[in-house]
Amino acid sequence: MNTKKERDLNLLKKKQGFTLVEVLVVLVILAILIAIAVPSVTAYIGKAKDRKDLIELNNVKKAFELMMLEDVENGYFGSSTSEESNDESNFLYNNATNFIYGVGDD
């Protein structure tokens, strides 16, 4: 006569793993979830990189502004006696300031 314990043991021996259909269903569900998640994650990573680049560009802008202020205070722009050299330094100064004030203002 089979006891309850023997019947349970026999049932466990008969069912030892997953069927092929069960494994395939799980794989299909995982593939669908991955197909949904990957594009949104890559878009988020792209936006984060854009923000990082903008922050770095603004840091360069601030450093350049400080450099320009120090150069103006020390007389490096427009301090030459030559009129041609003075025009050239003013041209560089004006273009550089126009450039740095246009960065990151979007």
Image (cartoon, helix red, strand yellow):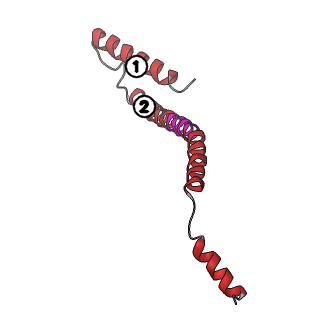
* Image quarter (top left, top right, bottom left or bottom right) of the N terminus: bottom right
Front in this rendered view, residue 70 or 60: 60
Residue 58 screen position, x and y as percent = 50, 33
Residue 23 screen position, x and y as percent = 56, 55
- Marked residue nearer the N-terminal end (2 or 1): 2
Helix, strand or loop status at disc 2:
helix
Secondary structure mostly seen in the magenta stretch? helix
Identify the residue at horizontal 57%, vertical 59% (top origin): 19
Question: Disc 2 designates what residue?
Answer: 64
Mark 2 packing: few (<14 Cα in 10 Å), some, or many (20+)? some
Whole-Å distance between the Cαs marked 2 and 1?
A: 11 Å
Front in this rendered view, residue 90 or 11: 11
Which residues lie in the magenta part?
39-52
Question: Disc 1 designates what residue?
Answer: 93
Badge 1 amino acid:
Tyr
Query: Which residue is at the far front?
Result: 1
Is-magenta flag for residue 80?
no
